[in-house]
Image (cartoon, coloured by chain):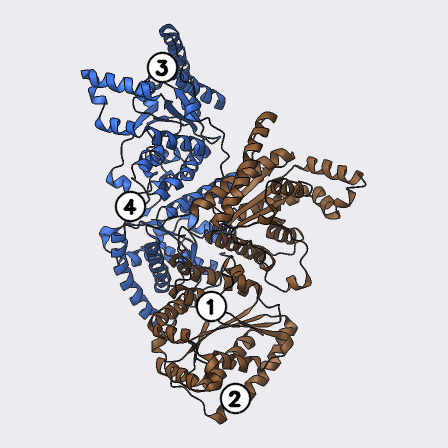
Chain colours: A brown, B blue
Amino acid sequence: MLKSWSKPKRPDEVELETRLKAEREKLERNQIKVKEGKVPVFIVFEGWGAAGKGSVTGRIIKNMDPRFFKVESVKEPTEEELRKPFLYRYFIRIPEAGRFTFLDSSWMKEVVTDKIKGELSQKAYRSEIDSVKRFERTLADNGYLMLKFFLHIDEKEQKRRLNGLKKDKNTSWRVSEKDMYQNKHYDKYLEVFNRYIDDTNQSNAPWYLIDAIDKKWAELQILEILNQGIETALTNRGNAVPILQNVFPLMPVPKLSDIPLDKALSDEEYNAELDKCQKKLRKLHNELYLKKIPVIIAYEGWDAAGKGGNIKRIAGALDARGYEVNPIASPEPHEKARHFLWRFWVRLPKTGHIAIFDRTWYGRVMVERLEGFCSENDWKRAYNEINEFEKELADWGAIIIKFWVQIDKETQLERFTLRQNTPEKQWKITDEDWRNREKWDLYENAVNEMLQKTNTEYAPWYVLESNDKKYARIKALKTVIKAIEERL
Amino acid sequence: MLKSWSKPKRPDEVELETRLKAEREKLERNQIKVKEGKVPVFIVFEGWGAAGKGSVTGRIIKNMDPRFFKVESVKEPTEEELRKPFLYRYFIRIPEAGRFTFLDSSWMKEVVTDKIKGELSQKAYRSEIDSVKRFERTLADNGYLMLKFFLHIDEKEQKRRLNGLKKDKNTSWRVSEKDMYQNKHYDKYLEVFNRYIDDTNQSNAPWYLIDAIDKKWAELQILEILNQGIETALTNRGNAVPILQNVFPLMPVPKLSDIPLDKALSDEEYNAELDKCQKKLRKLHNELYLKKIPVIIAYEGWDAAGKGGNIKRIAGALDARGYEVNPIASPEPHEKARHFLWRFWVRLPKTGHIAIFDRTWYGRVMVERLEGFCSENDWKRAYNEINEFEKELADWGAIIIKFWVQIDKETQLERFTLRQNTPEKQWKITDEDWRNREKWDLYENAVNEMLQKTNTEYAPWYVLESNDKKYARIKALKTVIKAIEERL
């Protein structure tokens, strides 16, 4: 695309000024529409060194109310960021509904830099490209306006600008070794930029090449695209998005009602096994830490199924500095204002750590589905979005273990009644639990669909038969141990 | 994708048979749902020579009612097909709503073969990839279920099969030189296949790699994906599809109401110019023919604006063997059952020919929009689909000229009244014309939006001021001449 690009014709000065004025005024009006329409706008500036990313961003935001936008500059990853999935530091920066985020350099820079340095194999490059495509598409599917600009100047112009900056004492600091290196190897960069842009040019997140030969002209090109994009995003607002064909090989799962729940352990068996398993897991945790392998353990299950006690037995085996338990309640306003997976991205562990989620992103296809907290289109789309999210974690190297803690309806009633009648347990039972219980069949149906549609090879489900909590705890420990051992 | 693929695990014989039986029965039911839900299903089989495309197709259709599907084998392009746009022979084969088309080799084969032969520059390859992506996406956007299967076997297995076939007198004819060549250059093909699959793997038309090591197992993999796909397509049926951001640089156009209509020619001027222009155009037509450049002239305009007479003056200058006029009425049932552009694809000229369209694909965003013949989402999506369609024609090398024949409301009334009062002209005026006239303002609004959103550099609009028909005819001739001369 970059190599075969034919520059748009710059209009004469009079026309330029007229159009620029019109577009600036339009943006002033559009920013309000964006706010009222609750559209999140994510704008990415990429381009050659000295192409003027900074100054053009400055020109665009001059037309805007500073309360509506944020400008972020993504620098070298920190120690912490290097221990997270590749897209982590970008996903956590997505804007809230109704707000603009301008990103000065993005995930493109990261991929391209690694590619130029020769640090990415062809396979790793392709895997990152796939991640990027899924990331941008899922944002678009969730109502984000994604705009990607590449500011283009040719080799000679870049050299002229860099030399100009270097000569002046006040600006010479702005020219880095890297800029000079890029100019010296312009053709090599052109090749890699061109390939990346072709590889990530998607219909719902297309690339826009900007002729950056002069600032006003660059501003006009960007404003026209930005205003067009906002109008398109507003048209699409609230509309359903097609459900995608599944592309992740799924493994068959039995229906909940076909799973026998009579498994049990005696106290002696339990105590002996518990001790053995916890010791083993403690040792493995150490190895994981040394090998910097992250582990994600996701718990879902019926109310009173025994999730809490089960998690305790896993956590009890772990070094407190190497794990965290994330209890997931209903999303807060600032979380609801973003992609539904955002609040899980920000809670991801570092490599070598274990993150346990007490309830998870699967809330989307259970409670949010059944209580109408999201649209039908939202939860139907979510199976694939979840499979993609977990693929991201798997590609990062995470061991993913998903537990469904299963009990039957009678057992739940017994435990609810016990809680109700035991003063120190009463805090554990609420009216909501009783209301949910009335919807047992609807939930069972939703859970069956969820298990069937998200039981991927890289993030399998395990059902914990928890009529006997002891049995379920030992099974959980053994499952975690086995998964870790297989990896090590 | 192909090179980094990890094969799915083949289930044991018992499980295989169980799942196969279930999927076959599901397909039997799903074919009825497809028919009733009016979903068009377009299935493409690609893969290595001797991977078993034919036999697997045979296995799939055994579960289906022969009235519901068509199997097409796309061979070497004919002389005629070579003189059409690259995608022509595939676009004309898209299925009708409610029916399946199985394609044995597709556009992939064409691109890949040219690439292997070294007949495609990097730029031409990229252009074809973009065409393919747009083609597959627009089908998906219009409710098509697009399924692309690649049947994979490794080099050794291919060799074994080819040798086996060759040894047997009854099957040796099935092994071509090309198959042997492919096996000998397996790695080279793998590289090109892999690249193509990566380049065209889109979320709304993903690739499915099939382990083709044995027939039953291949059938199962395909059936599972096919059934899943049908269920997804049925879920999406009737839902709106997001409007895409515009990616085609547009040129500014004046509003209709700002265009002065007082231009006129005297009879002498007209006759002299007509003669001169027609002679010139006749000469140019000859050159076009020799250079095999196709020309598309699209006419839209108000009722009684003088389209017919205008077209006559263009056609009058042309050799009858080198042009065709396509009058476009409302679509017939078999046309309505396909993508709205299908009826224009089948009417495309050959290279070197001129096709004049008397009314066009722009009906989608005028009459179909205003009369509710398509959904709001349909016509809003159509601006981009039309820009893409014309891009396809431009990439093919066509000169595209679009005329809007403009008159004012008073002139239309005069001409309507004259027609009504002149017996030999009465056939030209209908009640519908009067009804449309009542919606003048709505139409004007729609036309302005259309001009603004589809005035691309590669397919520009020209307004013909036709209050004076003579002026408009000469302007049309001169515009056509200028566009051709610029190309030659």
Give the Cα distance between marks 1 and 2.
28 Å
Give the Cα distance between marks 3 and 1.
72 Å
Looking at the picture, which amino acid does disc 1 mark? Glu
Instruction: Give the residue at the far left of this rendering.
Output: B423
Q: How crowded is mark 1: few (under 14 residues within 10 Å), some or many (20 or more)?
A: few
Give the Cα distance between marks 4 and 1.
37 Å
Instruction: Give the residue at the far bottom of this rendering.
Output: A268
In this rendering, the answer to whether B127 lies above or below B294 is below
**Mark 3 or 1: the one toward you:** 3
Q: Which chain carries label 1?
A: A
Q: What element carries label 3?
A: loop
The location of residue A46, given as percent across then percent down, is: 62, 45
Residue A273: assigned label: 2
The location of residue A358, given as percent across then percent down, is: 51, 73
Q: What residue would you read off at disc 1?
A: A457
Q: What residue would you read off at disc 4?
A: B96
Q: Which chain carries label 2?
A: A
